[in-house]
């Protein structure tokens, strides 16, 4: 886990939000439009679910940002929030245009999106809807 200084955290929140895995806190810039706050929160939840537990991988920032934004894109879709205007370029940029990298993170992304859906719907409600 890379611990950021207070200055680094302040810089990141200006960029929309950040996750502090050690403190188990997510911060989102309240000055953004509501839809962007939700998208950013979903992105940061993706980080929290995938990148801060024991045994999680954080080997490459491009991979973790691709995963987190893909979580925001998919989970946003479940909520009827189209994040494509932001998410597609963000993912393409962090993935370096590498389609194989994007494909390789799909399992992690789906695991996180399923966890978010379970939390929103409740596991019993989701099973009944399927």
Image (tube, grey):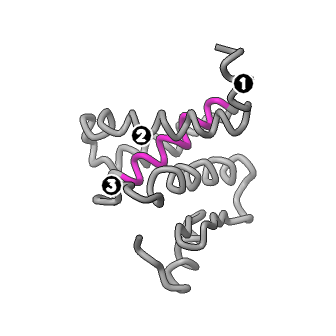
Q: Residue at x 68, y 54 (%)?
A: 37
Disc 1 marks which residue?
124
* SS of the residue under disc 1: helix
Residue 73 painted magenta = yes
The image position of residue 1, as x and y in percent, is 41, 70
The image position of residue 104, as x and y in percent, is 29, 36
Local packing at callout 3 (Cα closer than 10 Å; few below 14, some 14-19, many 20+) is: some
> Which quarter of the figure has residue 20?
bottom right
**Region in magenta:** 64-78
> Which quarter of the figure has residue 13?
bottom right
Look at the numbered discs 3 and 1 and tell me whether their residues touch, using CB distance below 8 Å. no
Front-lying residue, 47 or 83? 47
The image position of residue 52, as x and y in percent, is 47, 60
* SS of the residue under disc 2: helix
Residue 68 painted magenta = yes
Local packing at callout 2 (Cα closer than 10 Å; few below 14, some 14-19, many 20+) is: some
Disc 3 marks which residue?
62
Q: Which mark is residue 70?
A: none
In the image, taking residue 90 as reference, residue 79 lies left or right, namely right
- Among the two numbered marks 3 and 2 on one chain, the one whose residue lies closer to the N terminus: 3
The image position of residue 44, as x and y in percent, is 56, 56
Disc 2 marks which residue?
108
Q: Residue at x 47, y 79 (%)?
A: 4
Query: Is the stretch drawn in magenta largely helix, strand or loop?
Result: helix
User: Could you give the CA–CA distance between mark 3 and mark 2, rounded to whole angstroms?
Assistant: 14 Å
Indicate whether 72 appears above or below 44: above
């Amino acid at each position: 886990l890379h611990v950021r200084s207070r200055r680094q955290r302040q810089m990141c929140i200006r960029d929309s939000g950040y996750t502090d895995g050690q403190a188990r806190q997510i911060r989102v810039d309240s000055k953004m439009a509501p839809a962007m706050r939700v998208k950013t929160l979903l992105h940061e939840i993706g980080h929290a679910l995938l990148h801060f537990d024991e045994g999680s991988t954080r080997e490459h920032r491009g991979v973790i940002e691709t995963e987190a934004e893909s979580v925001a894109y998919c989970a946003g879709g479940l909520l009827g929030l189209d994040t494509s205007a932001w998410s597609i370029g963000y993912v393409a940029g962090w993935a370096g245009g590498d389609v194989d990298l994007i494909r390789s993170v799909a399992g992690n992304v789906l695991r996180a999106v399923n966890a978010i859906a379970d939390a929103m719907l409740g596991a019993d409600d989701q099973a009944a809807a399927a």
